[in-house]
Image: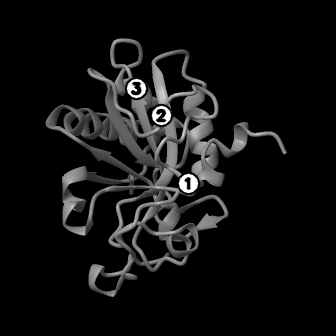
Amino acid sequence: DSQLIAPEKALPGRSRKMPNIDGYKHYITGKDVQEIPEGFEVCVFANGCFWGSEKGIWRLPEGIHSTTVGYCAGFTPNPSYEEACSGQTGHTEGVRVVFDPSKVSYVDIMRWFWEAHDPCSGMGQGNDRGTQYRSGIYYDNDDQKRLIEASKDAYEKQIGRPITTEIAAASDYDKYGGLWYYGEVYHQQYLAKPG
């Protein structure tokens, strides 16, 4: 299996964020993808190719404000798709979900996360291999951490194999510029767009 690049060997990146994200409206919901309304929460996870992962969240019945695809849990500020796929940034392809916890719970999103991929497959999913396809879920607070750890333990017992999913605090990546970087606009809601 692939090995995660050391932070000091990662590509340098850039200070400029991904172009065309400011003001970008979600293709399905029409909402500003950077907006987090009062009382809403964020879940960031990675479970393989981000196109299919993002699409899976759209199947939740209600409460999803927006979804975006991007690069998370790496060391290079503002990476491009090509850079993230090179394995030289430390990022994994991820999904950022902004949701209304009064309509859909963090537990509902986690349930979908665990069931939508093989959390025991190390650095990849299916034929997609490499550190950019590793499984991960990243928490913003102690409540999310407890829920993730409890659900991991329950799923691990159920499937009878060790789960290799990376579980980390979003704040662990502050020293690298942050946990989350938006992907290119052409990747956003890709599987909902015609053509």
User: What whole-number distance in Å separates the C-alpha atoms at marks 3 and 2?
Assistant: 13 Å
Vertical order, 116 against 48 (above or below): above
**Which label belongs to residue 48?**
1
Q: Can see residue 112?
A: no
Q: What type is the residue that disc 1 sits on?
A: Gly
Foreground tag (3 vs 1): 3
Sequence order check: which comes first, mark 3 or mark 1? 1
Q: Amino acid at mark 2?
A: Asp
Mark 1 or mark 2, which is nearer the start of the sequence? 2
Residue at image point 60% right, 46% down: 188
Q: Could you tell me which quadrant the C terminus lies in?
A: top right
Residue 99: give its label. 3
Query: Dot 1, crowdedness within 10 Å: few (<14), some or many (≥20)?
Result: many
In front: mark 3 or mark 2?
2
Compared with 92, 165 (above or below) is above
Find residue 32 and name its label: 2
Q: Position of residue 166 (x, y in %)?
A: 34, 56
